[in-house]
Amino acid sequence: MGLQNGKPSRKGANIPMLGLDSAGKSTLLYKLRYKDAFITLPTIGFNVDMIEVGKDFTLTFWDVGGQKKMRELWGNFLEDAGGLVYVVDSADKRRLEESRREFELLLKNESIKTIPVVVLANKQDLPGALNAEEITRKLKMKKHCSDRSWYVQPCCALTGQGLPEALQRVAAFARHYKKSKETFMALKELNSS
């Protein structure tokens, strides 16, 4: 482990957490970070929190508001991302098409062309919530994410169901992506000299 200013250096990745307003992004972030459920209001702006995964890797989650005006700013949070977490309200079938369109627009952004994606199918505790397979189909994951690693994790922000698995998946994807990117940059530098 290297030293920087006398402190051990930590590796990590920036992870934008995006999705429509009221999908449960902030509640998920607080449950992941503090292991407790909080009553939240739709985020105006963004929340940021760091979660240590293992002794030498930190994920910095950027929970960005999902209101229509905020979605226009999502692109600002994508540069230098090591992964993307997209949150879907699995029980809100009325807004699922809108969520799919926003997700597709995100995936077209050049900044995240190859980054891994974890979709959190939130609110599994509600009646009529679509399961992971149905969310996979509705978001057309196989079509839109064929060029990257992806995973759909059913979860519930209030109970914490599925969140340990989701965090492990995001961390594994981010580590692998960071390592691949570093290898690519090293080879590129080697070839240019």
Image: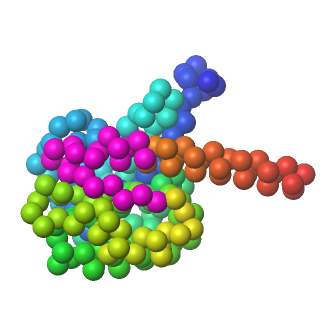
Q: Is residue 95 above or below residue 83?
A: below
> Which color scheme does this rendered protein use?
rainbow
Q: Would you say residue 166 is visible in this rendering?
A: yes
Identify which residue is drawn at 27% across, 47% down: 162
Identify which residue is drawn at 32% across, 65% down: 133
Residue 36: percent from the left, percent from the top?
A: 17, 37
Q: Would you say residue 73 is visible in this rendering?
A: no
Task: State the residue lying farthest toward the right.
Answer: 193
Q: Is residue 23 magenta?
A: no
Task: State the residue lying farthest toward the front.
Answer: 133
User: Is 166 positioned to the left or the right of 67 in the image?
Assistant: right
User: Is 49 positioned to the left or the right of 28 in the image?
Assistant: right
- Between residue 95 and residue 16, name the one nearer to us: 95
Instruction: Count how many numbered circles sit on residues in the image.
Output: 0
Which quadrant of the figure has residue 18?
Answer: bottom left
Task: State the residue lying farthest toward the top.
Answer: 6
- Between residue 2 and residue 105, name the one nearer to us: 105
Residue 47: percent from the left, percent from the top?
A: 30, 50
Identify which residue is drawn at 35% across, 73% down: 137
Q: Is residue 61 above or below residue 87?
A: above
Residue 181: percent from the left, percent from the top?
A: 65, 51
Q: Looking at the rendering, in which quadrant would you find the N terminus?
A: top right
Instruction: Point out the stretch of residues depicted in magenta.
Output: 150-169
- Between residue 71 and residue 147, name the one nearer to us: 147
Identify which residue is drawn at 58% across, 19% down: 6
Q: Is residue 167 magenta?
A: yes
Residue 132: percent from the left, percent from the top?
A: 30, 62
